[in-house]
Image (cartoon, grey):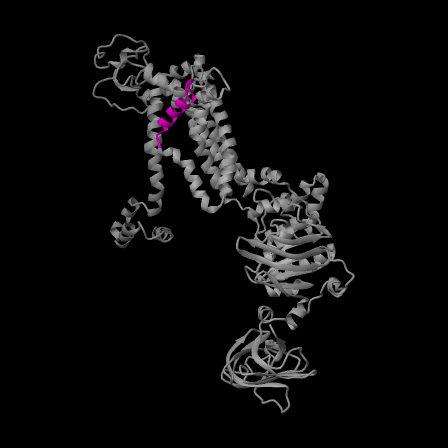
Amino acid sequence: MANAKPKAEQRQPWQDPEAKPYIEIQDVTKKFGEFTAVDDVSLNVYQGELFSLLGGSGCGKTTLLRMLAGFETPTSGRILIDGVDMARIPPYLRPTNMMFQSYALFPHMTVEQNVGFGLRQDGTPRGEIAQRVEDMLAMVQLHGYAKRKPHQLSGGQRQRVALARSLIKQPKLLLLDEPLGALDKKLREATQFELMNIQDKLGVTFIVVTHDQEEAMTLSTRIGVMNAGRIVQTGTPQEIYEFPNSRFVADFIGSVNLFEGVVTEDEPEYVRIESPAAGGTLYIGHGISCVPGAKVAVAIRPEKMQISREAPTAGADNSLSGTVREIAYMGDLSIYLVQLDSGKTVKVTMPNLVRSAEQRLTWEDKVYLTWHDTAAVVLQS
Amino acid sequence: MRSGYIPWGERMSDQGRFIPLLLDRIPPLRWLRRLFPSGQSLVILVPYLWLLAFFVVPFVIVAKISVSDQATAMPPYTEIVRSVASGQLSFATGRPAPAAAAQPAPAQPAASSDDAGDEEQATVAGGPPEDVEGGLYVKLNWDNYGYLFSDNLYYKAGKNAVFTAFISTVLCLLIGFPMAYGIARSPTTWRSTLLMLIILPFWTSFLIRVYAWMGILKNNGLINNFLIWLGVINDPIPMMNTNFAVFIGIVYSYLPFMILPLYSTLEKMDLSLLEAAEDLGCRPWKAFLQITVPLAMPGIIAGSMLVFIPAVGEYVIPELLGGPDSLMIGRILSNEFFSNRDWPVASAVAMAILIILVIPIVIFQHYQNKQAEAGA
């Protein structure tokens, strides 16, 4: 990725067994009646991290966030923040602040009063409140809007007021619920970088809930992918993308072509997988721990395959032939839907490296897809 | 001309535009189009007509009676505008100016008159100058209003009414707010049932419910009998015919009018605002004062108005439950009207009540408009 990642990514506290986690979620389960919203989740988040909880709607990510803020009580399990058990600590005494999905700005207060609300509760002297509110509004580029009411602001401005309000108390832990959900694409990108700057500047630990994988990828030091109340994989954006541990994660993050198959050759250096779906044998250039005959799925990202009209030279690792059915020109890249000879349709992307008004490939072209023996991931669950 | 019409017409829905559109197509008749109001103005017309028929007209009649003289007649007051010479215009406008102009010479001396038989009402109260030679004659009797100020009774009754209504409104708010809050925060499936329970008393007559309170409050009523049976008291506590009973009656009767608007504002409230407040370090009771109460303000004001306004003019409750000292302006009005048969003074009292009520409403409206401007 092109963007400059904050330093937090370079030091990887989760790799360090000595590091003390700032937030410890231990075997937390939350049930609403019969429904289990969060199912036995354990997670450690370290100081200065920007951790994203990523998942579809109803996967329990918001419930987990609300338990951290104190709006919900775990049915079982413990949550520790900075080593302190939060079980008996009400929201107003927790060292956390939350930015709500709906922003939850107080409609009867001006921007200034909204942002200063947290400080007023603590009895901070007036002069100091005024100063800090001003500084905070300058940081989110809202100077001059202090006297407005929330309904006089645009969606993006409201979102920045909400951010300023949740940051003004300089919380140790900032919880963000779909922080960029309501913004248009340009503003989203700008805000993403703003968030990372703030995180760098203030050293706050962020936990972000989002359903938007792109947002999670750009922002996070680590991502926890959630499904049906469980965290199915935790890792850096790169790990999650390149080494998904399950069909669900591979499918949820980015797009992927999955080939179901059976392991036929299992050597320490390589494996061969017989896949009727692909119409042939797939060669993986590294060993995996599995038994021959195991049912697995081979996942290949669309951009990891090369598409060409020329037949590959003999000895290529993996090669499948098919016909171009659909082309989507996206500007920077083109997406091709190729129907393999086996009948399965796969998605391939190619960057448009050469400036040309015409597509190099057109509909119904007979093409060959090739990929390197390290490009694919074998998924066993 | 035409270009002025068409775009305006196009902005509206097709409903109610058929005749104007038809007329548009027939050039010689196009001018007739003005006679047919568009659908939009028809819609606006309805509330104005309603207001005219049920507020402005009665108001003008009462205002007119309030400046007339009492008379032993049917109805028991004099007309304020009369044509003197026979065959002249005869209508009541209540406007003194044109009539004064129509009067050729304001000859004041009340001399003998030969058309006295024709004007029966004219024989009362001072007697108008009957010798005017034709034209309109207007006599406005402001003494009815003067009378309100001369007799301390009206001032005391008015003050007492405002005081009683104010205390009742505060009590309704104190009782109604927790109830409305409770309903608004109860599970969705319960809410309509609970609201129904609030409205349920309206299914029986207001009068019957007030009578029921007599049965509860009187010396050998439910409460006293129960307390005596318990042995808490030996002699009944006098509750009937006291101000206490009046407060109970008013609060009981008007409580739903407080609860319903409060409920509707509290129910709409976004609960994440309270979470946000708590998240920022605000204790729940402070969040209630700083977030819930200000946001419920429209409901508080609407409910208070709905209780205060009818309570000021309340007549039945003080009459039935109150004692001799629970003098309220509504009771005075009724006495003037029925016992004294003094319609002009009764009307003046009614006007006074209206003014008492209109002033706070106007001030409040003014304040609210200012607020809205400041907010916008």
Q: Position of residue B183 (x, y in %)?
A: 48, 40
**What span is colored magenta in the figure?**
B204-221
Relative horizontal placement of residue B93, taking residue A225 as reference (left or right): left
Q: Nearer the viewer, residue B284 or B140?
A: B284
Residue at the spot 34% in from the left edge and 44% down from the top edge = B43
Residue at the spot 61% in from the left edge and 47% down from the top edge = B276
User: Is residue A182 visible in the rendered structure shown here?
Assistant: no
Q: Position of residue A338 (x, y in %)?
A: 53, 81
User: Is residue B96 visible in the rendered structure shown here?
Assistant: yes
Q: Is residue B208 magenta?
A: yes
Q: Nearer the viewer, residue B345 or B293?
A: B293
Q: Classify A360 as above or below B128.
A: below
Relative horizontal placement of residue A113, taking residue A201 as reference (left or right): left
Query: Principal SS element in the magenta part?
Result: helix
Q: Is residue B349 magenta?
A: no
Q: Nearer the viewer, residue B248 or B230?
A: B230
Q: Position of residue B175 (x, y in %)?
A: 50, 32
Residue at the spot 57% in from the left edge and 50% down from the top edge = A153
